[in-house]
Amino acid sequence: MKDVTLSSVGEPLKTLLQRPGPLADDIAIRADNGELLGVVICARDYSFLLSKVEEAEDRLDQERVAQFHRTRE
């Protein structure tokens, strides 16, 4: 993950981040042409997504190990 300090972002984003309950809604960051460049999510949602990715990686690892053992028999 790359870190950015609050003092280095522009005022519109800083205002959104500093309001009470700042990330009840995700914050989309778009280019001037409307292309989605990134999304700011709350720490709780980030932790949830990270746990789901780790679960999926664990499942893939288990499948690979099982496949390896099947091919060795």
Image (tube, grey):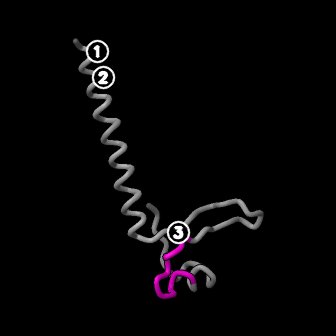
Q: From the viewer's perspective, is residue 17 above or below residue 38?
A: below
Q: From the viewer's perspective, is residue 57 above or below residue 51?
A: above
- Say which amino acid is labelled 2: Gln
- Residue 66 horizontal side relative to residue 26, left or right: left
- Residue 53 horizontal side relative to residue 23, left or right: left
- Residue 15, image quadrant: bottom right
Estimate the x, y position of residue 22 in percent, counting from the top left: 49, 81
**Under tag 3, what secondary structure?**
strand
Does residue 21 show up magenta in the picture? yes
The N terminus, quarter of image: bottom left
Give the class, few, some or many, for how many residues have Cα within 10 Å of label 3's Cα (few <14, many ≥20). Answer: some
Q: What is the CA distance from the residue labelled 3 to the residue labelled 1?
A: 44 Å
The disc at residue 71 is 1
Q: Residue at x 67, y 66 (%)?
A: 30
Q: Which residues are magenta?
A: 16-26
- Residue 38, image quadrant: bottom right
- Residue 14, image quadrant: bottom right
- Say which amino acid is labelled 1: Thr
Task: Mark 2 or mark 3: name the one nearer the start of the chain.
Answer: 3
The disc at residue 2 is none
Mark 2 and mark 3 residues within 8 Å of each other at the beta carbon: no
Which residue is disc 3 drawn over?
40
Mark 1 and mark 2 residues within 8 Å of each other at the beta carbon: yes
Q: From the viewer's perspective, is residue 55 above or below residue 2?
A: above
- Say which amino acid is labelled 3: Val
Which residue is disc 2 drawn over?
67
Give the class, few, some or many, for how many residues have Cα within 10 Å of label 2's Cα (few <14, many ≥20). Answer: few
Estimate the x, y position of residue 45 in percent, counting from the top left: 42, 65
Q: What is the CA distance from the residue labelled 1 to the residue labelled 2?
A: 6 Å
Give the class, few, some or many, for how many residues have Cα within 10 Å of label 1's Cα (few <14, many ≥20). Answer: few
